[in-house]
Amino acid sequence: MGFAEFSPAFLDDLVARAEGAPRRRQHHNVHSTLDEPVQRLFNAICVDSYIRPHRHCADPKRELLIAVRGRFALVAFDDAGRVSDCVPFGTSAQDGAGVELDPGQWHTVIALAAGSILFEVKQGPFQPAAAKEVSFWSPAEGSEAAVRYHDLLRAEVVKRFECRTYSADSPAASGSCLSMEGGSDTSRA
């Protein structure tokens, strides 16, 4: 076949597999091998999935993240682990579509809506041993401390997003604050 289709059923299945995965996320490689010059993958991320803050200095390549479904927050950190920025992106009209990161930027991504899926693009070949440098200042995935840290990051995202405003003619200008506790923009699983 001369093309690959990524149907709604494919995306639904990816979300279902993420919901059943221990780390609460599931990726699907579009590329055939790790040696391909462009690495492309879908990544379904549940709202309670903790991705340890990291950067990509060992194999310095830019990373492009585009929302396919749902809503996300990119959380950027300085070298000491302080949040330096939070950038919302998603598939709604008021959000940007995604972000592109320099290899040295400490970051994590938080899913803000159930069923959220990213499309990631990075230059290949992929070197698993050098894929990412995890931060020394954040807890390891799977730990009790990671659950608390993830909750703190989500709270920081909410606080920063509540300060953002939209123009009066925007669909989001209904007077309600952006919240991860429900509403039409986001939901908690």
Image (cartoon, rainbow, N blue to C red):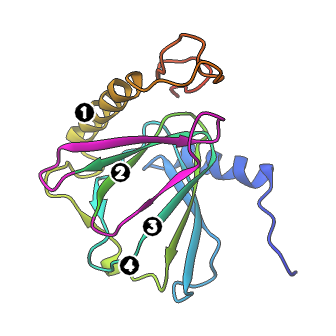
Residues at marks 4 and 2 touching, judged by CB atoms closer than 8 Å = no
In front: 107, or 43? 107
Report if the CB atoms under discs 1 and 2 are less than 8 Å apart. Answer: no
Which residue in the structure is indicated by mark 2? 108
What residue is shown at x 55% (from left), y 39% (from top)? 71
Circle 3 sits in a helix, a strand or a loop, which is it? strand
Q: Is residue 172 magenta?
A: no
* Side (left or right) of 5 relative to 143: right
The residue carrying mark 3 is 63
- Residue positioned 83% across, 75% down in the render: 3
- Which residue is identified by label 1? 148
Which amino acid, mark 1? Answer: Arg
Mark earlier in primary sequence (3, 2)? 3
The crowd level at tag 2 (other Cα within 10 Å; few <14, some 14-19, many 20+) is: some
Which residue is disc 4 drawn over? 128
For residue 14, above or below residue 33: above
Within 10 Å of the Cα at label 1, are there few (<14), some (14-19), or many (20+) other Cα atoms?
Answer: few
Q: Earlier in the sequence, mark 3 or mark 1?
A: 3
Q: Classify 25 as above or below 145.
A: below
Which range of residues does the magenta coloring cover?
Answer: 78-104
In the rendered image of this protein, does residue 146 appear above or below residue 127?
above
Q: Position of residue 42 (x, y in %)?
A: 60, 60
Q: Residue furthest front?
A: 168
Q: Is residue 13 above or below residue 1?
A: above
As drawn, is 103 to the left or to the right of 10?
left
Amino acid at the residue labelled 3: Glu
Closest to the camera, between mark 4 and mark 2, is: 2
- The residue at the point 42 percent across, 26 percent down is 164
- Helix, strand or loop under label 4: helix
